[in-house]
Amino acid sequence: MNIIPFPARTEWPALLARPVQSTQQIEAAVAPILAQVKAEGDAALLALAQKFDKIELTTAQLRVDSAELEDAEVQLSDELKTAIRQAYQNIRLFHEKQKQPVEKIETMPGVTCWRKSVGIEKVGLYIPGGTAPLFSTVLMLGIPAQLAGCREVVLCTPSNHPAIYFAAKLVGVTKVFRIGGAQAIAAMAYGTESIPQIYKIFGPGNQYVTAAKMLVAKEGMAIDMPAGPSEVAVYADDSAVPSFVAADLLSQAEHGADSQVLLVSTSKKLLTSVNLTLSTQLGRLPRQEMAAKALENSKMILVENQADAIDLLNQYAAEHLILSVENAEEVADQIVNAGSIFLGNYTPESAGDYASGTNHTLPTNGFARAYSGVSLDSFVKKITVQYITPAGLQRVGPVVEAMAEAESLEAHKRAVSLRLASLEETNLV
């Protein structure tokens, strides 16, 4: 990776730009797929599975039956099952603590307001196939859905990896379907004869899946967040271990050729050391070709001081941000744009991907400036409730009347005035 020394602030936007995606071209390819599934239902899913995945399915084979889900457990090693169960416990504990008890607030005497959380009734989880079976994402999405009390949890995946099925059973997924790509997003958004229409779609995918999610969102379907290729930014100083930093960069680069990694430092010595070990470690990776292509989109940036580093990182708004610096927690307090932050030399980003407890479904492509990662809140709706006593209406009513009159909404005012007059006539207050 090339080291870029002391770039002027005017150069930052160009340096921090993500790999360009032809959104219009991708959407043009995806839109007909959505339309076909919407019009033809299961028949379209079968035809598209044959066209894109070279798989011949029958309607009966779209849904993974319970026997296949049960059989998945015996196909896994005890070591992997133990690891998945431990990750499940950690992720569940972290998300369980996000539950908020109902708190009734008396805003003025006789006027009480509160808010309750209700699980979204029907949610859809998308788990890509590709070169990596992302059973960890089943945990990340299924556990908060389970805690939220979502009544129906539908999972679509083109993968038949037993770990995905095992994790799906563990988190209480109600239905699993053997379908992938943009057509899976369409099926969950519109519903087919076999796949129920759901209310919100979650999960990562390639650029076509992402485009499908964005297109159905334009039609009113709720999605978790805009997302794109995975990314990591690392801020390291001379207290960092170069081999650790290189490993973190490569762990993200191996996701795909369109991933991006960014290393920021005030130390040229550190950047040079990381570059040396990066080359050595890259050569040992099974996915080295993919990681090498990702590194072509990546940069090492030498900055003058920590203040510049923090400003640059906040401007980048990384999905994952690793702070391998002496005062990591102090720096973290100054980070306002990031999906998830990892502190110190012994907190690799891959721990958050799998088992520390935090969620790995995070905003990419700079969306961390305005979006949070997936949490328990992503799977619930917040419904507000209010209760006003007769005495409370006597107090708040005149406020409402004055404001409604000022907005020229007479019916709003009258809804209060009639009640106040009734109270005076019956002497209820």
Image (spheres, helix red, strand yellow):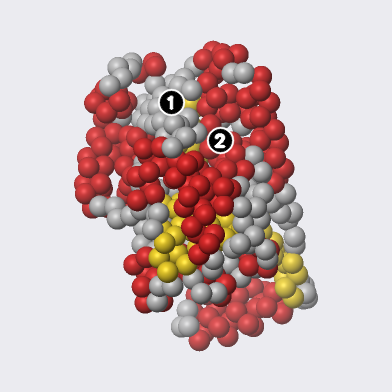
Q: Position of residue 195 (x, y in %)?
A: 41, 29
The residue at which mark 2 appears reads as 136
180, above or below 393, in the image: above
Q: Nearer the viewer, residue 354 or 369?
A: 354
Compared across the picture, whether 312 is left or right of 48 comes to right
45, above or below 302, in the image: above
Name the amino acid, label 2.
Ser
Residue depicted at 42% across the width and 62% down the height: 3
Q: Nearer the viewer, residue 281 or 229?
A: 281
The quarter of the rendered structure image containing the C terminus is bottom right
Q: Is residue 410 visible?
A: yes
Badge 1: few (under 14), some or many (20 or more) residues near its Cα, within 10 Å? many
Name the amino acid, label 1.
Ser
The residue at which mark 1 appears reads as 159
Q: Position of residue 324 (x, y in %)?
A: 61, 58
Please give the label number shown on residue 307: none
Residue depicted at 63% across the width and 67% down the height: 331
Badge 2: few (under 14), some or many (20 or more) residues near its Cα, within 10 Å? many
Q: Position of residue 12 (x, y in %)?
A: 39, 71
Residue depicted at 64% across the width and 73% down the height: 419
